[in-house]
Amino acid sequence: MPSAAGSTPLYRVVVFGAPDDPRELSQVLELTLGMHATDALVHARTAPGVSSLALSREQAERVVAGISAVGLGAELIADADIPVLTRATVVHHASCRETGLEIIELHGRESALIAWDDVDLLSVGQIPKESSRHYQTNEMMTVTSGRRTGPSTFETPVTPGPEAWILRTRPFRPYRIDHKRMNYEYLGDRKTDSATTNFRLFIDDIIAHAQRAYLTPATRAYIERGSVADYSFDTAEELQRATLLHLLIRRRIAGAPGTS
């Protein structure tokens, strides 16, 4: 894998669209970086998004020029300027208040109050959930969601469900919400027995209050009850990658520093 070992700072390339044929993009990587054809095609198929290749500025500029030549939007960004989503706060209890989105800690105390104007981006997608494995014993049937040694009689897949990423601006902070791991008590009489329905009510409340927030295309498809295919992702990591890409698009539109 090409890299700029020993040089600082390192850069990555953000590709803002997917080529009709990934081989167009892979050929750019072969020509500009001398990558092996197979490795180049693997990387090409991750577009759109932030490339995993750590490059020198010169290398990144060559790649961006090559990608632009085949009709795709691309920019380089310094590693240090890429927002970090991997340390997101996982939210289990929140309330939509007139004053903002209240994040509540495990002991029931407020840990953050995010003013609605500080909700910068909302990213919703449906992702696969972990399957449950069922094991027959002599006495009873047990259910686990983790790995377990010994024979299993059958495995029941869990229906895919929605997940949300909420990105705050001042200061920047990402929050991640799994629809089944949330406490929706703030909904009061609107709360139902369905986590999926409660999650949708929660998202609707956020959108009603955070009117300056950027809604990703998948989020719009979700709230407009469009085709499930338009807001489904193969993995949680894919949703995270899409969230990062749309944050960078948001900053690009706003003319924020960080990309060049």
Image (cartoon, rainbow, N blue to C red):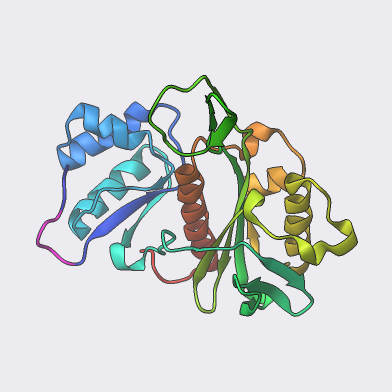
Residue 198: x and y in percent read 77, 52
Between residue 103 and residue 234, name the one nearer to us.
103
Assess whether residue 6 is covered by the magenta stretch: yes
Left or right: 144 in relation to 222: left
Find the residue positioned furthest to the left: 6
Residue 183: quadrant of the picture: bottom right
Assess whether residue 222 is covered by the magenta stretch: no
Find the residue positioned furthest to the right: 189
Question: Is 117 placed above or below 233 here?
Answer: below
Left or right: 109 in relation to 197: left
Stretch in magenta: 4-8
Left or right: 174 in relation to 224: left
The answer to whether one can see residue 239 in this image is yes
Q: Main secondary structure of the magenta part?
A: loop
Looking at the rendered structure, the number of numbered marks drawn on it comes to 0
Q: Residue at x 78, y 47 (%)?
A: 197
Question: Is 135 placed above or below 253 here?
Answer: above
